[in-house]
Image (cartoon, rainbow, N blue to C red):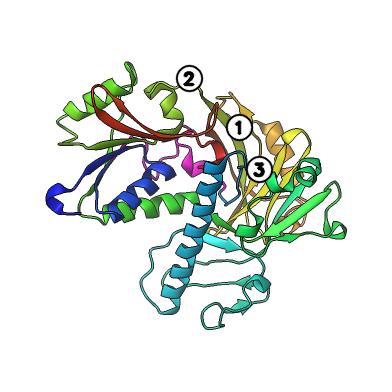
Amino acid sequence: MNEGHQKHVVVIGAGVIGLQTAVFLLEADYKVTVIAKHLPGDLSPEYTSPWAGAQWRTHATTDQPEQCQWDLETYRYWQEMIEKEAADRANRKTVLNSGIGVMAHPKHFPNHKSAYIPYLMNILYISSTADAFTIQIFESLNYWTDPRPLTTAPEKHLWFLPHVIAPTTLPTTSLPSGVSYGIAYTTFCLDPTVYLDNLQRNILSFPKASILRHTLSTNNGLAHAIKTAQGDQSLRLGKVDIWINATGLGSKALVPDDGMFPTRGQTSLVKGQARKAITWVRENGGVSYVIPRPGSGGTILGGCKQDDNWDQTVDEDLAKQILGNCKALAPELLDEKGEFEVVSQQVGFRPSRCGGARVEGEEVDGGVVVVHCYGHAGGG
């Protein structure tokens, strides 16, 4: 793009969607300004991204083709990212840590040379002596108590298996008590705080990028908020060609979009890194999960999905239930008394939306172009 005609895009929101969008736009030679109430490093319950698990696990079914495509693009993007990161480390190049790790079994990567990925038992470590960041490879397991939706319409629910690395249907003899069906495949896990920080640093490495902490007015709708921001001399936005709304739950008041609602999640961060990434879909939609956080020495245990629940306080009874349900999934993290060492407990709110995510453009206030990208619930 010719600099004299360089388009200026303002991204509203600095969660993972807003920041990742900003990176892609900058790589395409746009000028980008990110404005947001919360930035990487903040730990407000209003700021969804730091509270993610986080792992690649699709929530989409084949009747949601756009979501399926987004999930596959994310899988491929992270795969390319860690392969480049690993190659750079092998060549002793400077690496900007993504915070991503790969969880699978070494047998899934039989063609990698030992100089590129040295195996150590069932764990593969790729690290530089400078920061000892690790990419770890294990199996990722998915269990179901009730297999009927999967076995009656596998093409709808398990559509992604041909597209991921080393998909396997687990033999019934290997399943834990209470599990009727299970699969394994290679997935990607990340520490969201590291990932967000990396995205922010990546953005600020571009000369035509800026990140501003600013709270938009939500009293009179999106058009008024944009007009007010455009006229705020402290922001110095200048001419703006496109606005991107990536405000997640903030869109409920900002747009306003009455279809937005929170899906409350509660997790425990425990000491030690689990050997596997595991998700168990239980009866009546309940879920238990174990998500290692690469390089952090910790593991996230969950969880719950409570729609329309804004309660920010930790439910102690639920916390005990989560820890109890996860003991059989990550016994390697239990102490001599058979308990997890809990580092912290946290609550976050997934930005859910009736009808699914809104990803579309519109013109507001007489020609202002806005692209909406919000409402992805737990699939952001």
Quadrant containing the N terminus is: bottom left
Q: Let me know if residue 50 is in the magenta part.
A: yes
Task: Using the image, tell me which numbered label, if any, was put on residue 258.
Answer: 2
The answer to whether any part of residue 273 appears in the image is: no
Relative image position of residue 98 (x, y in whole percent): 44, 59
Relative image position of residue 371 (x, y in whole percent): 35, 35
| Left or right, 290 with reference to 82 | right
- Find the distance from the CA under tag 2 to the CA under tag 3: 28 Å
Mark 1 or mark 3: name the one nearer the start of the chain: 3
Label 2, secondary structure: give it: loop
Task: Using the image, tell me which numbered label, if any, was put on residue 314.
Answer: 1
> Around disc 1, counting alpha carbons within 10 Å, would you say few (fewer than 14), some (14 to 19), or many (20 or more)?
some
Which amino acid type is shown beneath numbered disc 2?
Asp
Where are the magenta residues, as a range? 34-53
Q: Quadrant of residue 235?
A: top left
Task: Using the image, tell me which numbered label, if any, was put on residue 302.
Answer: 3
Which amino acid type is shown beneath numbered disc 1?
Val
Relative image position of residue 77 (x, y in whole percent): 47, 58
Label 3, secondary structure: give it: strand
